[in-house]
Amino acid sequence: MATFLYKLGKLAFRRRHFVALIWVALLTLAGVGAASAPTAASSSFSIPGTEAQKAFDLLDQRFPGSAADGATARVVFKAPAGEKLTDAANKADVQDTVSAIKSSSKQVASVADPFAAKTVSKDGTIGYTSASYKVSSMELTDDDRDALQKVIDQAKETGLTVEVGGDALQAMPETGATEVIGIAVAAVVLVITFGSLLAAGLPLLTAIIGVGIGVSSITALANALDLGTTTSTLAMMIGLAVGIDYALFIVSRYRAELAEGREREEAAGRAVGTAGSAVVFAGLTVVIALVGLAVVNIPMLTKMGIAAAGTVAIAVLIALTLIPALLGYAGKRVHGRKARKALDARDVTEQAEPKANMGTRWARFVLRRPVAVLIAGIVGLGAMAIPVASLELGLPDDGVQPTDTTQRKAYDLLSDGFGPGFNGPLMTVVDAKGADDPKDAVDRVVTAIKDTDGVAAVTPATFNKAGDTAIVSVVSKYKPSSVETEDVVHAIRDEGKDIKADTGAELSVTGSTAMNIDVSQKLNDALVPYLALVVGLAFLLLMVVFRSVLVPLKAALGFLLSVLAALGAVVAVFQWGWLGSVFGVDQTTPIMSMMPIFMVGVVFGLAMDYEVFLVTRMREAYVHGERPAQAIVTGFRHGARVVTAAAIIMIAVFAGFIGSSEQMVKMIGFGLAIAVFFDAFVVRMTIVPAVLALLGKKAWWLPKWLDRALPNVDVEGEGLAKGAAAGERPEEDRELVSA
């Protein structure tokens, strides 16, 4: 592989005009495709195999046109101090608002009168109306939302307190200046790392080109492949991350080759042949992690993973071809002015001992005290992982919105007027088609639910036209996102088993609260198979890369330790509230259900990037004849600076999301940032060298039978070294073209 990539790098360097033109053409083609493609319809969120989803599907069949998964707007009214909503003037204002909502959009399916529906609190001060839409919240247009907001603003002018909950009028998260600061920090780190604005700009430029092609392609294909409007989110985040990383690795190696006195074309070839090999395998681990999301069997998550994997593949191709082409344009300016003068004045025939940099000094420190360093790293991460034992999973509702949003205010008003469980009613669907007496079966269901512990209220059943299916709304005594409400859902479902045995009627629980519970359970059940698949495949891949059993094992165990520690930090901050004021956490909340799998997928890819780039440099030095301890020092001398820069960039970018007003976005940003910090600096740059120092030559042990069975991909560039020693220079690009 090193020889193939060496030739590819030299070809791209020499034919830089052609290579650059190809990538510009691809970017233009993707952009034109995205601009001319029809607008993609928002994909509905479905969770195959869950009871809540089956109930939604049944409602679509038995209650046609009801739009069971349609958007809802729960408009909450509160009378002025000392007054009641039932007062004549206030009642007229409320009814006028209800009429205005009904006529505000063609998508409004129904709006209930609070007084006719008896949705006014016992003290008469708080009431609400529920507006149902014909389409999901993702399919509502800005005009629909603006019309609703205009009605609410007019209602507030009457003196009433009016707030809106539900998903029809979603609050757009605000990131403030922190996200911009994160990107600015990334640029500054690149400038400091390279000492050259031109060299610093290359990773940013190529990453943007790669993401542009990837996201534009997703947009162009979204309607045809039903990708939905949210599919490109993960692709953009991961594409930027790995795009910067991979370009950074190759540009850094190119500069190192120039510093050793090689000609520019030869340096480009060797940079792609060595660092490029690491990029290929690092990219494969990321692709495995993202495509593996299909194991969860959530269509939206699967599409997001595959789309992001495609963007990563584009980032790898750009790093292997466009980077050497742009290096051909850059010339000697890839070094800073001082570095260029030093290189021009240096006698390349002199082989002076390289000055010990920070990476060298750190590696030597770890080698002197490997046991102490290893114990400190493992104990530290282990302590951080302790809160994971208290992990509670859930999905966000309006109760975790910032306190100044209308959704949160509506949520609090309803809790005050009707109880905490009112914000997440459970929709119980009774399929009485198989019962002898459907009405009697439904009555038994209502009675059984009323007697269930934790149930605060049960509404009368609503039958469909055929009279064989009914909807019963149930209100829990507890908050929708609480463990107690989850117990209520399970208790009702258990009652359904007895009712089916007695009457033949099937009972199922759905609604947003039940769907959240089912999603959390599905994601929780999928975590272990997902980990086994991703880590197992990556272990095999890393065995091929490192020609070792213990090094991949150490890499996988280190990753698990860093992810557990990061999840522990997330639990401590967002679930327990530790340092909540520092990170802007208004209140504690269960951890988002997708967080563990999302962190595993994203962080695993980035962790293996650092592992492959740092350890392949050690492996390269060992293969070329250095002792194990010296190989560790060599790997750190060449790789620590660039891995540190890559990690700081990722931490800065992810930390930018901590400034978001949306608590779930804040949680993702914090979790990814702290995970990268733990993995890059504690695992890869502390625990890894300590373990390798203790293992010595055993670290690179591979059974002979396994050595013969595994393909030899020559990631370290051993073939290039042998060719150079024999006086051979593989310059025949025709072989590459014909291949």
Image (spheres, rainbow, N blue to C red):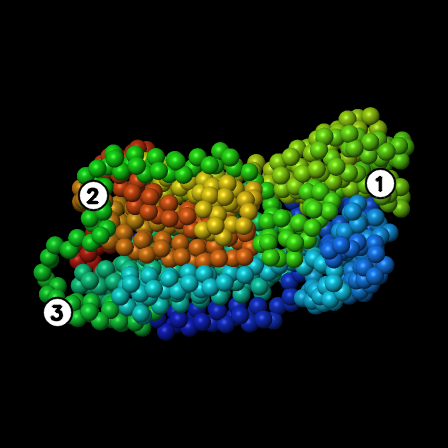
Who is closer to the viewer here, 527 or 648? 648
On the rendered structure, is 109 left or right of 624?
right
Q: Nearer the viewer, mark 1 or mark 2?
A: 1
Q: Position of residue 18 (x, y in %)?
A: 39, 72
Q: Nearer the viewer, mark 2 or mark 3?
A: 2
Q: Earlier in the sequence, mark 2 or mark 3?
A: 3
Q: Residues within 10 Å of mark 1 (few under 14, many from 20)?
A: few
Q: Which three-letter amino acid code belongs to the residue tagged 2?
A: Phe
Q: Which residue is mark 1?
A: 460
Q: CA distance from mark 1 to mark 2?
A: 73 Å
Q: Is residue 614 visible?
A: yes
Q: Which residue is mark 2?
A: 365
On the rendered structure, is 522 left or right of 289?
right
Q: Residues within 10 Å of mark 3 (few under 14, many from 20)?
A: few
Asked if the residues shown at circle 2 and circle 3 are in contact, with their CB atoms under 8 angstroms apart, the answer is no
Q: Earlier in the sequence, mark 1 or mark 3?
A: 3
Asked where in the image residue 402 lies, by quadrant, the reply is bottom right
Q: Earlier in the sequence, mark 1 or mark 2?
A: 2
Who is closer to the viewer here, 435 or 571? 571
Q: Which residue is mark 3?
A: 345
Q: Residue furthest front?
A: 82
Give the SS element for disc 2: helix
Who is closer to the viewer here, 218 or 713? 218
